[in-house]
Image (cartoon, rainbow, N blue to C red):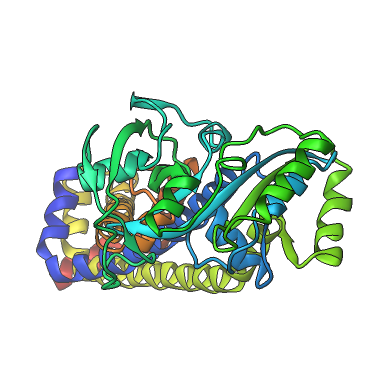
């Protein structure tokens, strides 16, 4: 039976290919939507894990979160280092990790920070050690894979965030790789981590080591006062870009952001809230594309129905002859039904390969897709249901033609043929 069905399909190559294409586009679109929305949601949730609040310069809260947590946008500006000491002295704050942004190496951001950032992302060293001296860096797994950088390698950072921005490199102060992180699936995979002093040294900014690698716990009042007095004598250019904050208690989620936004010149943004708002903005587009995918699926089903109906009418003589030779109605019914199922199954597999192939091409060709963390090698259980749904569509489309051919009267058909 299968051999006979395959022969029928091969007889109408172009029509079969067109039917497969229509349904494959629908399956591919639905899988692409599933993959992109699910992976983006997971990436945003994982990337902001353990980060309750981002404090930075006034501007767009979403921009602040994207630039400081996910490293997908430009920073809103710089803030004074005194803000770090003040936050660490706040009883509602469990930890405060500073970020100093502004340079890149081959499009990967160089982030001045503290070793605690590695722990914040639950990252582990795959080779080497953590940075300890100025100009030492630890690179993420994606940085190592894309650049081929190894332990002990020297490189020159470039000002700005664009790989082809045309900015001159800081030739006088090269960085050296002392550690490589294991893959985490989080934004840290795409970062080059170094100390804040390294970032300031590269730009020739005077600074003090007092605040450079401070403890993540609260300082005493005397320590805070001394730090503030010391910073008054240092260059105001030795600023930071943002601070990643973790709360000490749930009550801080209500009081701390409002206090910062109301009483200071800084801005506090919640990564969870802004990530949810960003994903919500895409919901109308996702729903529209899902509807389009379903319409294309319906068009594919109708095309399969028309094709099988015409094919059954054209093969009435052959099918009648099969019945005369001993084939029962169930066999004839199954032959036509199997033809629709095979077309739908080929369509579903083609759509599955197309969706994942397109994701692979996009991740290799466009840095923004790679930075968003979209992987072509992720599979979700819902994809099985999409494939099964496509097969059911082909089966339903074949039911009427299959039922029709078993109801035919053999005598008139044999007379005509």
Can you tell which quarter of the image residue 265 is in?
A: bottom right
**Is 365 placed left or right of 198 in the picture?**
left
Outermost residue on the front side: it is 233
Give the residue at x 30% y 61%. Answer: 362
Residue 63 visible in the picture: yes
Give the residue at x 48% y 50%. Answer: 39
Can you tell which quarter of the image residue 407 is in?
A: bottom left
State the count of labels: 0
Query: In the displayed structure, would residue 269 be above or below residue 282?
Result: above
Q: Nearer the viewer, residue 230 or 413?
A: 230
Residue 53 visible in the picture: no
Q: Nearer the viewer, residue 179 or 184?
A: 179
Q: Position of residue 305 (x, y in %)?
A: 36, 68
Q: Position of residue 4 (x, y in %)?
A: 15, 49
Q: Position of residue 321 (x, y in %)?
A: 16, 55
Query: In the displayed structure, would residue 132 be above or below residue 192?
Result: above
Query: In the displayed structure, would residue 167 be above or below residue 185?
Result: below
Give the residue at x 25% y 62%. Answer: 365
Query: In the displayed structure, would residue 5 be above or below residue 74?
Result: above
Q: Nearer the viewer, residue 329 or 355?
A: 355
- Please identify the quadrant where the N terminus is shown: top left
Q: Position of residue 182 (x, y in %)?
A: 38, 31
Q: Nearer the viewer, residue 38 or 366?
A: 366
Give the residue at x 65% y 72%. Answer: 60
**Is 293 placed left or right of 218 in the picture?**
left
- Please identify the quadrant where the C terminus is shown: bottom left
């Amino acid at each position: 039976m299968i051999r006979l069905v395959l022969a029928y399909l091969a007889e109408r190559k172009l029509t079969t290919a067109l039917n497969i294409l229509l349904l494959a586009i629908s399956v591919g679109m639905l899988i692409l939507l599933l993959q992109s929305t699910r992976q983006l949601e997971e990436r945003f949730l994982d990337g902001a894990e353990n980060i309750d609040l981002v404090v930075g310069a006034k501007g767009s809260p979403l921009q602040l979160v994207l630039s400081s947590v996910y490293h997908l946008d430009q920073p809103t500006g710089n803030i004074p280092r005194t803000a770090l000491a003040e936050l660490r002295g706040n009883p509602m704050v469990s930890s405060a990790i500073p970020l100093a942004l502004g340079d890149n190496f081959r499009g990967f951001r160089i982030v001045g920070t503290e070793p605690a950032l590695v722990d914040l992302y639950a990252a582990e060293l795959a080779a080497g050690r953590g940075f300890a001296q100025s100009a030492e860096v630890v690179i993420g797994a994606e940085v190592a894979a894309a650049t081929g950088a190894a332990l002990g390698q020297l490189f020159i950072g470039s000002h700005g965030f664009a790989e082809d921005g045309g900015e001159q490199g800081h030739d006088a102060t090269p960085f050296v790789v002392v550690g490589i992180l294991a893959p985490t699936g989080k934004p840290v995979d795409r970062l080059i981590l170094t100390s804040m002093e390294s970032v300031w040294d590269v730009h020739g900014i005077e600074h003090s080591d007092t605040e450079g690698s401070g403890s993540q716990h609260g300082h005493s009042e005397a320590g805070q006062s001394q730090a503030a007095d010391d910073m008054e004598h240092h260059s105001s250019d030795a600023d930071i870009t943002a601070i990643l904050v973790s709360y000490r208690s749930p009550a801080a989620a209500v009081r701390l952001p409002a206090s910062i936004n109301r009483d200071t010149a800084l801005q506090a943004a919640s990564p969870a809230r802004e990530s949810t708002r960003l994903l919500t903005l895409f919901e109308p587009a996702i729903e529209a594309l899902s509807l389009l995918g379903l319409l294309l699926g319906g068009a594919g089903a109708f095309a399969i129905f028309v094709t099988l109906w015409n094919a059954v009418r054209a093969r009435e003589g052959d099918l009648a002859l099969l019945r005369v030779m001993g084939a029962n109605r169930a066999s004839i019914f199954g032959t036509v039904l199997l033809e629709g199922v095979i077309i739908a199954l080929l369509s579903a597999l083609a759509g599955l390969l197309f969706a994942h192939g397109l994701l692979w091409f996009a991740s290799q060709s466009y840095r923004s897709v790679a930075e968003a963390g979209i992987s072509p090698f992720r599979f979700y259980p819902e994809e099985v249901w999409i494939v099964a749904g496509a097969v059911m569509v082909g089966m339903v489309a074949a039911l009427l033609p299959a039922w029709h051919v078993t109801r035919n009267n053999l005598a008139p058909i044999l007379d005509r043929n």
